[in-house]
Amino acid sequence: MSIVPQRKESMSLIPGLALYQTRSATPDSGAFSDTVLSQLKELRGLTGWRFGVSTRGVDHVATIDLAIRHTDLFSCVQTTFNPLAQASGETLERAQAAVLEVLVK
C-alpha cells in the first residue's frame, strides 16, 4: 500500500502541515523499508514536509539508530526519556550530533 495518496487528504485537512511523524516505529515495523523510505522521499518532493520518527517498545535505541542512518530523510526523533527510562540517553546525544531534533515523551 502506498502512503503517497494520503497526501491530498492530509493537505486538505491540515494545510499548514510541516512535519509528518511516523508513529510507533520499530526496526521491524516497516518504517525503514526501502518502499516506505522511497515513498517518503517522493512525498517530501511533492510537499516539502519534514519527516520524523516516534519510537515504541524495547527497540527504541535501535530505531533511533536507524533514523540517524537516514538523516537525509528524517529530521527528528521522538522517544521516551525520563528519570526512570534513560536507556536512550546516549543514542539521543548521537541523534543530536547527527542534527536530528530530539523530542521526548
Image: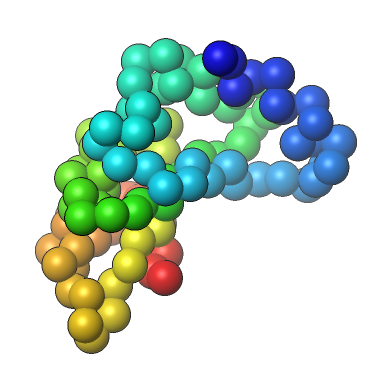
Identify the residue shown where x is 58% and y is 15%. 2
Position of 26 compared to 88: left or right?
A: right
The x, y position of residue 53, in whole percent, is 42, 46
Where is 81 relative to 69, above or below?
Answer: below
| Quarter of the figure with residue 33 | top left
| Quarter of the figure with residue 91 | bottom left
The x, y position of residue 61, in whole percent, is 19, 53
Identify the residue shown where x is 20% and y is 49%. 59
Rendered image coloring scheme:
rainbow
Position of 10 compared to 97: left or right?
A: right
Position of 46 compared to 87: left or right?
A: right
Number of numbered discs overlaid on the protein picture:
0
| Quarter of the figure with residue 1 | top right
Where is 84 relative to 105, above or below?
Answer: below
Q: Is residue 102 visible?
A: no
Identify the residue shown where x is 18% and y is 45%. 62
Direction bottom: furthest residue: 83
Position of 35 compared to 83: left or right?
A: right
Where is 57 relative to 25, above or below?
Answer: below
Identify the residue shown where x is 25% and y is 36%. 27
The x, y position of residue 14, in whole percent, is 80, 45
Quadrant of the image for the C terminus? bottom left
The x, y position of residue 78, in whole percent, is 40, 58
Looking at the picture, tell me which residue is in the foreground, 26 or 50.
26
Direction right: furthest residue: 12
Where is 91 relative to 9, above or below?
Answer: below
Q: Is residue 22 visible?
A: yes
